[in-house]
Image (spheres, rainbow, N blue to C red):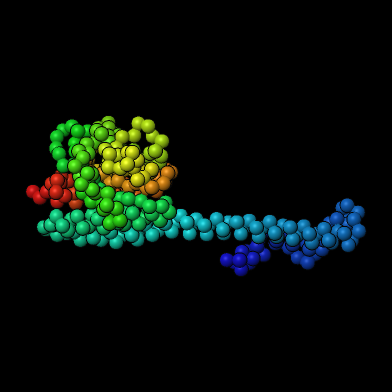
Amino acid sequence: MLKEILIKSVKWKVWTWCVPSLGGLVLILMFGSNYFNLDIKTSILLGVISLITLWLFRFLYLLCEALIKYCHNTFIDSIWGDAIVELKNAYSEIHSLRKQEDISDEEFITVMVKLCDTLKKIFDKKTKADCCVSIKVPISSGDNLEALELYNLCRDSSHKGRDTDQYRKIKHRIIANTAFSKIVIKILRGNQKHLAYVNNNIADSPDYENTSRECYANGVLPYNSELVYPIVPIKGNETKERDLKGFICIDCNQSDMFDENRYDIPMVQGVADGIYDLFTRRNNGRLRKNGCYRTK
């Protein structure tokens, strides 16, 4: 990298203007003598210093530019570049499953767990922290979306311990959980562009409600950042009340981990859209309470 920068700094077009020939170089070196009555030695010294300073500024500029590009490629592009590869592998499993005429409950759950594992791997690398990914689906029916009860379809392999008997016994209704209720309100209002729920400081959110709190000592959740997105199509459904299949939930044990303005939400949105048809095929996203997807 340094070799390339040195070559670029020397081949700078400005040099052809400043020092077009040997005569031009002499003119620069004698500038102080000709115009400021400096002695020749001082004039040459100042001329050399000026040229070196100009080159040094050019070199440092190119070095900073290269370092910024390197850091961007290493710490930003590599994260999302790796995410593309990881999601490609996950979607190959999803597409393979979609091509089957009959999909067993076990096959479906296995592929969804792999998808959760993939998203966890991506967000672990992005946040440099411990993230948990789960998919929640409705197990009750009715026109009132807010009253629907949710069931944890699957979770990434590293956090299955959260699915305790106490957790399973709780009725996790949409209306009793801030993330889900806020998303449903947006769906009902036809707000199709901003369906994500992001909370980067749950501990300091006094109005935040979560039915999982009673599973933990003093009601303290094992995470402090949360990104939730509904499993709905991006296009193809023009009605206000979208056919909600469930939620992709990603949480992190540290604060300020999810970016609302860059890639986090669009990536999860794409994943939700990508699995929507598969959930539709599996009987509108409804589950039995034992965790198996209902068949038609």
Residue 235 visible somewhere in the drawing = no
Q: Residue furthest front?
A: 217
Q: Is 221 situated left or right of 277 in this image?
A: right
276 and 138: which is toward the camera? 138
Residue 25: percent from left, percent from top: 78, 63
Above-or-below relation of 184 to 37: above
Name the residue at 38% across, 59% down.
Answer: 82
Name the residue at 14% across, 37% down.
Answer: 141
Residue 2: percent from left, percent from top: 61, 66
Q: Is 107 situated left or right of 197 in this image?
A: left
Name the residue at 28% across, 56% down.
Answer: 157
Name the residue at 86% across, 59% down.
Answer: 43
Residue 107 visible somewhere in the drawing = yes
Q: Is 24 situated left or right of 242 in this image?
A: right
Above-or-below relation of 289 to 49: above
Residue 194: percent from left, percent from top: 34, 38
Above-or-below relation of 221 to 50: above
